[in-house]
């Protein structure tokens, strides 16, 4: 790590930006200087709150000090904003999903490659203490050969709490695009890349009503499946069964469990950084909670950005990589393609499992 922190500019000053705007307090190798938004009032409000400079997108991209652009815009803007940042010579780290279409994401990857720039992407929760402990246990053979994983994210949807929830029900949204990345990134980093998938989808409520403020009472026309269920076959033969939905009465019922030839591993919420991690081996009577030695167990969004900044400085691969986030995007589309076309979909993408995060990094 160098003495000079890497300069970061944030585009998108909405709901999630607060967490990122605090990340340079945790990760000393990055320094967030500017925040931009298409809505300058938001950019100004967040800049003032977190002691940063407000800027237009063009001003931010013209700043020669800024090395990495963290793109926290809505999914439909992920690709256009990322392409603009790449054209301006910046490395880009996108919130999930990487883009709404494979084609847009491929354009981003090709442009980055041609300009010698990097792309990274959320989620970075797989770098948290909980999932890194699961990774260590798997690599040590704690559950033997993984056989089957079950992943579920069952919820009512976002219109009761998010101030601007419409995008969750438009292309690039839906439960698989919104929450799937946590589960699929966890699975791909634990089990390796997927080979093929099959999926089924439905829209249970074609119209929804916002009950949060300030848009209380506004109707949303649902344009994407709000229940996506599917099977994934991984390269080594393990299978995962995943369901994501915004359509059930249950407030938030989640889980990620891996069953192996020698034991079972209950992973923590992949949308978080901490535990608990529970293990039950073949002859154990009871579950036992595995101690987490890793450092990052509270909300540490930005860890992936900090790792990318360090990786650029050190000339090594970054962990929340373009290949990983593209593979996850490819998977999410594959469930929808499979449901629409009534066939298994073979993945055209792959990724290496990122190196485990050292216990005390950074
Ligand atoms: N809210 C969460 O809890 C959460 C958690 C993790 C990830 N995310 C992801 O982060 C992203 C943002 O989510 P959010 O909840 O902050 O949304 P949001 O709607 O609150 O904020 C998005 C911001 O982007 C701005 N924007 C849109 N298009 C733009 C453009 N072309 N140029 C500049 N600014 C533009 C909007 O004005 C808005 O301020 C989404 O991709 C979401 O999936 C959100």
Image (cartoon, rainbow, N blue to C red):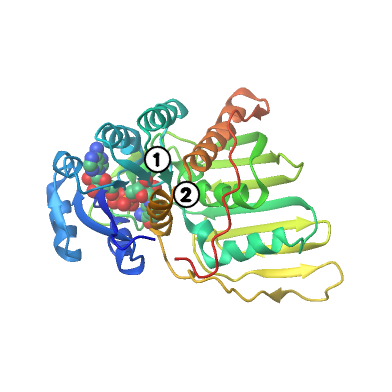
Query: Quarter of the image holding residue 358?
Result: bottom right
Confirm or reject: label 2 Cβ below 8 Å from ligand 1.
no
Identify the image quadrant of the C terminus. bottom left
Q: Which x, y percent locates residue 233?
A: 71, 39
* Residue 192 seen anywhere in this rendered image of the structure: yes
- Asked whether the residues under the numbered discs 2 and 1 touch, taking CB atoms below 8 Å apart as contact, a structural biologist would say yes
Instruction: Assign a secondary structure to mark 1.
Output: loop
Depth check, front residue: 230 or 71: 71
Q: Which mark is residue 118?
A: 1
147 with respect to 334 (left or right): right
Q: Earlier in the sequence, mark 2 or mark 1?
A: 1
Depth check, front residue: 308 or 336: 308
Q: Residue at 33% x, 63% y: name it.
A: 23
77 with respect to 269 (left or right): left
For residue 200, above or below residue 300: above
User: Which residue, given by chain and number where applicable, does mark 2 sit on?
Assistant: 318
Query: Quarter of the image holding residue 84?
Result: top left
Q: Distance between the residues labelled 2 and 1?
A: 9 Å
């Amino acid at each position: 790590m160098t003495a000079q922190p890497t300069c970061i500019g944030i585009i998108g000053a909405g709901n999630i930006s607060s967490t990122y705007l605090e990340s340079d307090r945790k990760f000393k190798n990055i320094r967030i200087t500017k925040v931009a938004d298409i809505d300058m009032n938001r950019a100004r409000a967040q800049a003032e709150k977190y002691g940063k400079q407000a800027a237009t997108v063009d001003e931010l991209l013209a700043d020669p000090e800024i090395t990495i652009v963290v793109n926290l815009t809505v999914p439909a803007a992920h690709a256009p904003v990322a392409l603009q940042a790449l054209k301006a010579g910046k490395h880009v780290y996108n919130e999930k999903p990487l883009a709404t279409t494979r084609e847009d994401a491929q354009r981003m990857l090709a442009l980055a490659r041609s300009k010698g720039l990097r792309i990274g992407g959320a989620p970075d929760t797989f770098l948290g203490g909980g999932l890194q402990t699961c990774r260590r246990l798997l690599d040590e053979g704690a559950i033997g050969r993984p056989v089957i994983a079950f992943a579920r994210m069952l919820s009512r949807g976002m219109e009761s709490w998010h101030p601007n929830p419409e995008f969750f029900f438009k292309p690039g949204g839906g439960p698989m695009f919104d929450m799937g990345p946590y589960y699929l990134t966890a699975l791909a980093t634990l089990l390796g890349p997927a080979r093929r998938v099959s999926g089924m989808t439905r829209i249970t409520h074609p119209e929804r009503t916002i009950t949060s403020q300030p848009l209380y009472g506004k109707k949303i026309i649902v344009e994407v499946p709000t229940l996506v269920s599917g099977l994934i076959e991984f390269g080594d033969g393990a299978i995962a069964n995943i369901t994501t939905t915004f359509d059930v009465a249950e407030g938030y019922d989640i889980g990620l469990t891996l069953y192996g030839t020698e034991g079972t591993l209950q992973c923590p919420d992949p949308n978080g950084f901490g535990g608990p991690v529970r293990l039950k081996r073949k002859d154990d009577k009871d579950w036992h909670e595995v101690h987490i030695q890793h450092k990052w167990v509270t909300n540490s969004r930005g860890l992936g950005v900090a790792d990318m900044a360090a990786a650029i400085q050190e000339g090594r691969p970054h962990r929340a990589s373009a290949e990983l986030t593209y593979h996850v995007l490819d998977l999410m589309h594959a469930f929808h393609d499979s449901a629409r076309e009534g066939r298994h979909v073979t993945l055209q993408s792959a990724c290496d499992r990122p190196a485990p995060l050292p216990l005390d990094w950074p």
